[in-house]
């Protein structure tokens, strides 16, 4: 049996949903291998692996590839800042000069708390949805 037929046969067994793989930070091509080492929040620094251990996908597709993820992270930060400001207002913090520092502290704390999430998911958005030619391909999974 050739590799393509084997891939089609095992496709139903290996099928992982795109959203599940995205949320769990799995490789966009095989949806099995982990992209990051370490937890998002923890004492160990999360690092991005260079290559997927399951399908040998090189994550940094070209030099400087992840500079584009800074724009995605910026958009995520803006959405979080607006959401935190609106939430503070809805929860009773009036928009007056005396409350300015409360808004600054809330927004600054939110940016610090969300920074590991922004780091991870801005890179995942770039890999999953903004990279042309990178699609789910279970036939690339290495045999163990």
Image (cartoon, grey):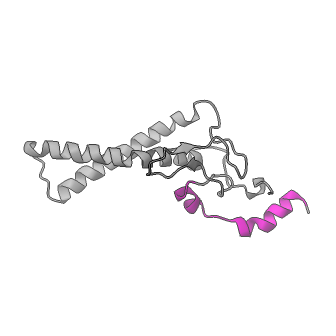
**In this rendering, would 38 be left or right of 61?**
left
What is the quadrant of the C terminus in the image?
A: bottom right
Magenta segment includes 12: yes
- Give me the residue at 11% from left, 46% from top: 99
Is residue 116 or residue 93 the one in the foreground?
116
Q: Tell me the quarter of the picture where residue 142 sits.
A: bottom right
Q: For residue 113: magenta? A: no
Residue found at x 52% / y 48%? 125
Which quarter of the picture shows residue 62? top right
- Numbered range of the magenta stretch: 2-25
Residue at the (71%, 52%) spot, across then down = 54
Residue lying farthest right? 1
Which x, y percent locates residue 71? 45, 38
Place residue 25 in its image quadrant: bottom right
Q: As drawn, is 143 to the left or to the right of 90?
A: right
Residue 63 drawn above or below residue 6 = above
> Which SS type dominates the magenta stretch?
helix
In the rendered image, residue 88, in percent from the top left (x then y), is placed at: 20, 54
Q: Is residue 130 left or right of residue 106?
A: right
Q: Residue at x 80, y 64 (%)?
A: 8
Q: Furthest-front residue in view?
A: 43
Q: Position of residue 32 (x, y in %)?
A: 66, 58
Residue 79 falls left or right of residue 49: left
Total numbered labels placed on residues in the image: 0
Q: Residue furthest top?
A: 63
Residue 70 against residue 79 in the figure, above or below: above
Q: Position of residue 1 (x, y in %)?
A: 91, 63
């Amino acid at each position: 049996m050739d590799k393509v037929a084997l891939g089609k046969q095992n496709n139903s067994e290996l099928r992982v949903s795109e959203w599940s793989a995205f949320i769990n930070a799995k490789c966009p091509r095989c949806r099995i291998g982990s992209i990051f080492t370490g937890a998002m929040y923890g004492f160990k620094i999360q690092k991005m692996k260079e290559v997927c251990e399951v399908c040998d996908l090189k994550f940094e597709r070209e030099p400087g590839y992840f500079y584009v993820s800074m724009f995605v992270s910026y958009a995520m930060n803006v959405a979080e800042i607006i959401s935190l400001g609106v939430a503070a207002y809805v929860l009773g913090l009036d928009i007056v000069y005396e409350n300015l520092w409360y808004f600054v502290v809330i927004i600054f704390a939110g940016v610090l708390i969300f920074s590991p999430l922004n780091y991870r998911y801005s890179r995942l958005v770039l890999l999953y949805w903004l990279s042309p030619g990178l699609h789910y391909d279970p036939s690339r999974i290495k045999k163990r």
